[in-house]
Amino acid sequence: MTADTHKELDDFLRSMRQAYNSRDLKAFRAHFWTDKRFVNLDISGRVDIGWGAYEEILDSEFRYMDKVSLELRDTKLIPIDDQFATATTSWKLSQIDPDGRTVSQSGRASFALTRFRTEWKIVLQHYSADPHS
């Protein structure tokens, strides 16, 4: 993986996190392959097959929560070539509901990324909870 590709992917994941934190579903969606074959595996064990299923959950969460904060740390990018990569990262998510309660979770995540023409897209993501938190 070239240094330019590594920087592209770092910037891409930063942009994805920022779109999530601003609860901008349209900007967040732009980071994903919005195909019916997209797969999201979340920390509760839920499996969303197809972008639409995952987007419904996100829309509901974004509308309900007063604030969300997603952090990604210690991200490791694993190149396959300049068209495909995987990323593993530690994550922490804090959400504040309308009653002011904060719920925080953390764990590990992995992403499969593919370059479609000139844009990177997440084609599969998997979140798992930290058993120690």
Image (cartoon, helix red, strand yellow):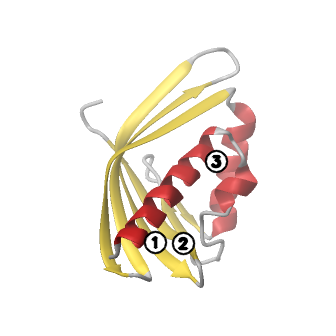
From the image, tell me which residue sits under label 1.
113
Q: How far, Cα to Cα, is label 1 from label 3?
A: 17 Å
Q: Position of residue 27 (x, y in %)?
A: 70, 55
Q: How far, Cα to Cα, is label 2 from label 1?
A: 6 Å
Q: Are marks 2 and 1 in contact (CB under 8 Å)?
A: yes
Q: Residue at x 48, y 68 (%)?
A: 124
Q: Between residues 21 and 96, which one lies in front from this camera angle?
A: 21
Asked if residue 4 can be seen in this view, the reply is yes
From the image, tell me which residue sits under label 3.
19
Q: Position of residue 26 (x, y in %)?
A: 75, 56
Question: Hey, what amino acid is under mark 1?
Answer: Leu
Q: Secondary structure at mark 1?
A: strand
Q: Are there few (<14), some (14-19), or many (20+) residues within 10 Å of tag 2?
A: many
Tell me if 36 is positioned left or right of 3 in this view: right
Q: Are there few (<14), some (14-19), or many (20+) residues within 10 Å of tag 1?
A: many
Tell me if 66 is positioned left or right of 125 in this view: right
Considering only order in the chain, which callout, 3 or 1, is on the residue closer to the N terminus?
A: 3
Residue that protrudes farthest toward the front in the picture: 4
Q: Are there few (<14), some (14-19), or many (20+) residues within 10 Å of tag 3?
A: some
Considering only order in the chain, which callout, 1 or 2, is on the residue closer to the N terminus?
A: 1
Quadrant of image for the N terminus: bottom left
Q: Secondary structure at mark 3?
A: helix
How many marks the image carries: the answer is: 3
Quadrant of image for the C terminus: top left
Considering only order in the chain, which callout, 2 or 3, is on the residue closer to the N terminus?
A: 3
Question: Hey, what amino acid is under mark 3?
Answer: Ala
Q: Which mark is residue 120?
A: 2
